Amino acid sequence: MLEFQLFRVMVYPSKQINMFEEQKSPSEILKDTISRLPFAELRKGVIWHIGNISSIGEDGLYFRVGRTSKSTIAVYQDGNFVDEEFETAPYTHVILDVPLEICAIAKNTKLSPKTTGIANQFIRLLNGSDYARQLKASFEIGEINDPEDFITYLHDAFAITKFWITFSMPNAFDVNEDFYKPMEKLLRESAGEKGKTELVGHSLKSDSLEDLARTAASTGNDAAAWLIPEREQAKVKKTLKGNPVIVSHDNVDDQEQKEALLQRIRNLYKQIRRSKK
């Protein structure tokens, strides 16, 4: 049984527009960068790679991320103990929905104790690739958290007195238009990279906050709230982070299994983004 964790990849094309070059969308840049099989020595003697790329329908990709390194093992040969050098190459599976820029990375403790560690190395590979440098594009990755528990706390609270969310540079196509888009625009025009907005009141409306929480979750950002669970109780803090979306899947050995997992990922993402309003 494989355990996949969901992440959102954010693609930032170059701010410099060259009229003589074809302008690529963020998802096209992501797909093209991966397809060039980037590799890099991210630690001395340890080289990370992308490989085994195959398409899943029109908008999906399957590939593997792993690392190669030299190791030695003591063996006994012809009456002598000797050290033999060999290459190790642990890897893991990745499923990517290209237009949504959503990827699922399988856990492999041989690569990193946490799947987020593999995700960080993956994004370093993309940022360090020759193709990304050529396009002057950059990438970020954030874990997608399940917002349902957090949203339940918001709706069940007697009162919400403070709420904050983080946001990054413009990229996501499916964010809250009324709030997130202006904040992202301000961040870009200010040459910023990350932003945070805080709302304070005696009793903030949970319905409005739910849509913001879902947007934060779907874009790999964070949200938190100070709330009073019941009348005359003390305030408590609840956060969106800490509840990553995990998908268990038997294996991805054949095309049918890859397609089934990709559809599950899409359904989960749609569920996160849905609005109850």
Image (tube, rainbow, N blue to C red):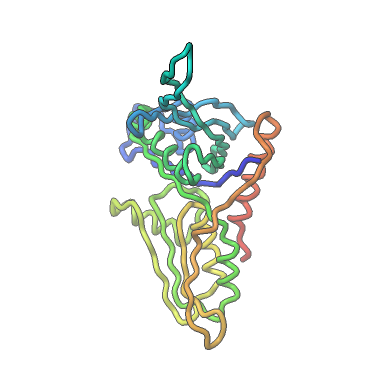
Which residue appears at 45% of the width and 24% of the height? 73
Q: Is residue 124 above or below residue 240?
A: above
Q: Is residue 58 above or below residue 106?
A: above
| Residue at the bottom extreme, as displayed | 232
- Foreground pick, 66 / 215: 66
- Foreground pick, 188 / 210: 210
The percent position of residue 64, horizontal first and vertical second, equals 53, 31
Which residue appears at 35% of the width and 54% of the height? 194
Q: Quadrant of the N terminus?
A: top right
Q: Quadrant of the C terminus?
A: bottom right
The percent position of residue 13, horizontal first and vertical second, equals 38, 39
The percent position of residue 193, horizontal first and vertical second, equals 33, 51
Left or right, 261 with respect to 227, comes to right
- Foreground pick, 229 / 100: 229
Which residue appears at 44% of the width and 37% of the height? 122
Q: Residue 139 falls in which quadrant of the image?
A: top left
Left or right, 266 with respect to 124, comes to right
| Residue at the left extreme, as displayed | 190
